[in-house]
Image (cartoon, grey):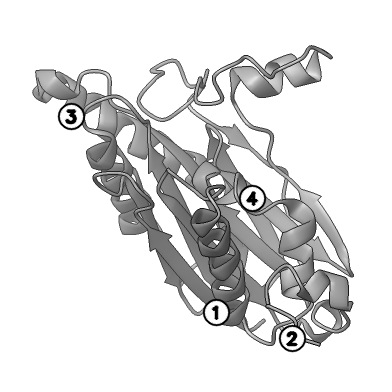
């Protein structure tokens, strides 16, 4: 199955960019990774880079997917961060979020792992699915039916570098991939500024994953000029399976107005 990808990573208004993205597309399988260093703690950018590199270095795109191997990749990424915490006292509390997508190209299967509040979305047959659940206090409170207006959205209960007990991430079941599926991996700085309806509307106006990310980035920048944009780093990777023409067809003028200045 053909795979087309695009990625972006922006600093926002932060002093540095602690996000990391990466991919490996082999003949039989593919791997995509997005990491976001935990804010407010020294070494976040180091943790994000260690995690990304540990997974991509071990991943072999010339073999079919193996669920246990993927767990091993993520556990190795966690160990790399824990080892660096021990070696560098200034980084003893560093950590990173992770969202990673794995595709078996021959068998048309997908598998993913995540830790923290970086997200994976799947767009299929005109519908959007948020397939990961944030490992955050805000999400826990929402799930329990409580108000979350006064809660710090950056409080995570799971991230790489936080656990040595095997609970470093959550893992999906193996899911069949369909021709036309579109995946989006992104950090919280991205999804805080582009809601799910805007993601879907943008997808319905483009022909490539690069155009999709460009359109959503324009929306983030437009909001930023209006005082509503991202103060955080924001990063995303778009992955299109096969030929997603059916997902990129119709839009209304009201949808388009979010992205383009319409004139009389």
SS of the residue under disc 1: helix
Check residue 84 in the rendering and tell me which mark sits there, or answer none: 3
> For mark 4, does the 10 Å Cα neighbourhood hold few (<14), some (14 to 19), or many (20 or more) residues?
many
Q: Earlier in the sequence, mark 1 or mark 2?
A: 1
> For mark 3, does the 10 Å Cα neighbourhood hold few (<14), some (14 to 19), or many (20 or more) residues?
some
Residue 176 in sight from this viewpoint: no
Q: Residue at x 30, y 49 (%)?
A: 17
Q: Earlier in the sequence, mark 2 or mark 4?
A: 4
Q: Quarter of the image holding residue 37?
A: top left
Specify whether 88 is left or right of 150.
Answer: left
The front one of 12 and 179 is 12
Vertical side of 85 occupied by 239: above or below: below
Q: CA distance from mark 2 to mark 4?
A: 20 Å
* Residue that numbered label 4 is attached to: 120
Q: Earlier in the sequence, mark 3 or mark 1?
A: 3
Q: Quarter of the image holding residue 82?
A: top left
The quadrant in which the C terminus is found is bottom right
Q: Earlier in the sequence, mark 1 or mark 4?
A: 4
Q: CA distance from mark 3 to mark 1?
A: 35 Å
């Amino acid at each position: 199955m053909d795979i087309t990808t695009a990625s972006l990573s922006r600093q926002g208004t932060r002093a540095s960019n602690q996000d990391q993205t990466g991919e490996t597309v082999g003949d039989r399988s593919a791997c995509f990774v997005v990491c976001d260093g935990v804010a407010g703690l020294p070494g976040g950018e180091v943790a994000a880079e260690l995690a990304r590199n540990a997974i991509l270095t071990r991943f072999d795109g010339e073999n079919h997917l193996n669920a246990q191997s993927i767990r091993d990749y993520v556990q190795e990424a966690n160990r790399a961060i824990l080892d660096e915490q021990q070696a560098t006292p200034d980084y003893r509390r560093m950590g990173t979020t992770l969202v990673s997508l794995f595709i078996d190209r021959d068998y048309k299967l997908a598998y993913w792992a995540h830790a923290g509040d970086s997200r994976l979305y799947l767009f299929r047959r005109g519908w959007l699915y948020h397939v990961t659940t944030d490992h955050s206090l805000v999400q826990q409170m929402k799930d329990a039916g409580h108000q979350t207006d006064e809660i710090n959205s950056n409080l995570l209960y799971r991230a790489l570098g936080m656990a040595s007990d095997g609970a470093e991430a959550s893992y999906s079941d193996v899911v069949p991939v369909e021709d036309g599926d579109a995946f989006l991996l992104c950090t919280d700085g991205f999804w805080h500024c582009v809601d799910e309806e805007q993601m879907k509307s943008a997808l319905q106006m483009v022909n490539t994953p690069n155009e999709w990310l460009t359109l959503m980035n324009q929306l983030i920048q437009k909001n930023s000029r209006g005082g509503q944009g991202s103060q955080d780093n924001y990063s995303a990777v778009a992955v299109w399976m096969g030929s997603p023409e059916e997902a990129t067809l119709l839009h209304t003028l009201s949808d388009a107005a979010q992205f383009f200045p319409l004139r009389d």
